Amino acid sequence: MGAVKQKGEGRKKQKRRKDAGLIAGIRYDIRHNPYLCLLCVPTIIWFVIFAYAPLVYLLVAFKKYSATAGLWGSEWVGFKNFEAFFGSNSFYNVTFNTIFLNALFILATMFFSILIAIALSEISGKYFKKTTQSIVILPHFISWTVIAMLCEALLKTNNGFVNNILVALGFERINFYQNADVWPALLTILRIWQGAGYGSIVYLAAITGFDQEMYEAARVDGATRGQCIRYLTLPLLKTTAVMLFIMNIGKIFNGDFGMIYNLVGTNSMLYRTTDVIDTYVYRMLVESTNVGQSSAVSLWQSIMGFITVMFANWVTKKADPDSAMF
Amino acid sequence: MAKSNADLAFEAKSKIRQSAGDKALNLFFVVFILVFAVVCITPFLLVVSASFSDETMLNKLGYSIFPRQFSLDAYKLVTTAGDIPQAYIITIFTTVVGTFLSMFLTCTVSYAMSVKNFRSRTALALFIYFTMLFNGGLVSNYLLIKKFLHIDNNILVLLLPSLCNAWNILLMRNFFNGLPDSLAESAKIDGANDMFILWKIILPISKPGLATIGLFYALSYWNEWYKCLLYIDTSHSKLYTLQYLIQRILRQVNYAANLPSEAAALQGQLPTYSFRMATIVVTIGPIILLYPFLQKYFVQGLTVGSVKG
């Protein structure tokens, strides 16, 4: 009895100590878990230097930056850098492209990931399944630099693989690298090619985890396999799909610099439909060396990204507290 | 005699399996997955075939699944052109050293975060998670590295900024969380300290997790080109990674192709396109070769559980 009581009191004490806050927690850990603290130090130092120190440079967004004067010596200009960006035509163009392309990518990849997962879970034949799964995941591990080079070879107007097929089928050649209108579709197809197989892993894992007895019961009751998919698999996949969807929505303001820069590069004929915030910031920084304004665009993107993540998480919390990220 | 329930169920099931609709659906799935797999693999076959093709045939007839006229010229050029072996050495060096350092920094902190008795674990997780939600962006990092740390045009820039990845740290923490506490506790009672426990007890039983995260890090170093683009200028081209070299080769030939007279002069002398394809083969070769062995690990690792902050 006494021991139980003591234990209970100890727990209460522990709880009180926990409430005492961050500093007390750290002090406790230094005294009681010195080795664990030591283990954390290198990584904490890395995060301070490479993740938190850059935040100081966000001040540049409010300055007329000059390399000679440096961060502290440059002249303050208030919100002028932001006004210049919001007043330009590029503002609407790059913001629209970023959101529009990301929305296309999210929806298309999600659709195909789920389709692949369902197809893989329905087909029989162990080796066929394994081989096809390996193949559809593979493109994810190929970098956009390599894909860009592949694309150039496949999409060339003269003797490109795709154009040769188009001609063989009786269509006209498409001059891909001069036609901005085809690029949103083209980028989406590439994104499906690269990401859908990889994305299907999570869905397939979810499907494998479903209770098999449910399916057997449904079959015995006369459900066709189509009905099983429609009324069992799809509704059960909803939680996973919603969670991944919201996570992706949170990143909708982050253009895929690697993809766009490698595929489009400096081909300004395609900027109208492909230029995203990230490539715009890069060009402004490196080509026109307008550090102040590019920093302002970058900060605006970070803030919008933060707001979207928070909003997405808030929505999830309302709808389904279990799938919220934090 | 009445049949048992199990027999009835079996009969019913096999009857359902034979229905025409089910068969059609199955056929649709098989065809779909086959088509998708073929679309995924075809570019790779075209590249390999083109890298072994004769340049003049490639220009005349375009790409094909099998090489029309076998030639090793492209590979001869790849091995003799000084840039590519040099880039290979740099890429292997950064991949090996970088992955090792990354794993050290990741495992230490994620183990600490997985110990229940560690009071600061929530605060630490928040400290790391916040960097995923809000970051300085391209310009701030650029200024930090060029104006404050001064590690541009230095091999350190290919390593240091990419050592930690918040997502990988949280994945690894989830993996450690899944291990039974009793192992570490009993070692603790025997007087072992946390470093010893991590090294001798936790890491040996965490191989699937280590393989997954290690693979993610290794791939990010192997596919590195962005740091070269931003921080390494042409006067230090011996620090270029393979991926960045590919990007430069693509841009340069684009440039030549825009000038018809010069491009025509090149044809028949230098295997331009087959050379590019051979570069791709040597770059993605190691990934493709290792892929079948590593696949089971990252499928496992990805399904360890969703990341919660």
Image (cartoon, coloured by chain):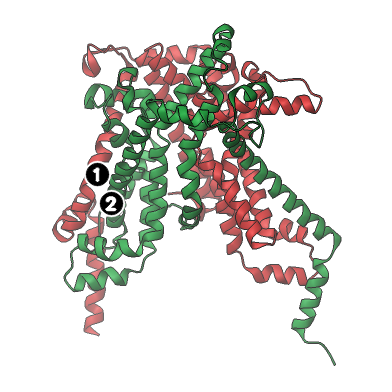
Chain colours: A red, B green
Q: Quadrant of the N terminus of chain A?
A: bottom left
Looking at the picture, do discs 1 and 2 lie on one chain?
A: no
For disc 2, the neighbor class at 10 Å (few under 14, some 14 to 19, many from 20) is many
Amino acid bearing label 2: Val
Disc 2, SS: helix
Tell me if B37 is positioned left or right of A6 in this view: right
Mark 1 and 2 residues: CB-CB less than 8 Å, in contact? yes
Q: Position of residue A209 (x, y in %)?
A: 58, 63
- Asked whether A282 or A236 is in front, the reply is A282
Amino acid bearing label 1: Ile
Instruction: Judge whether residue A104 can be spotted in this image.
Output: no
Residue for badge 1: A44
Against A294, residue B151 (above or below) is below
The chain ID associated with circle 1 is A
The quadrant where residue B121 appears: bottom left
Q: Position of residue B185 (x, y in %)?
A: 26, 70
- Asked whether B183 or A130 is in front, the reply is A130
Instruction: Judge whether residue A92 can be spotted in this image.
Output: yes
- Asked whether A114 or B250 is in front, the reply is B250
Residue for badge 2: B109
- Asked whether A238 or A157 is in front, the reply is A157
The chain ID associated with circle 2 is B
Q: Which mark is residue A189?
A: none
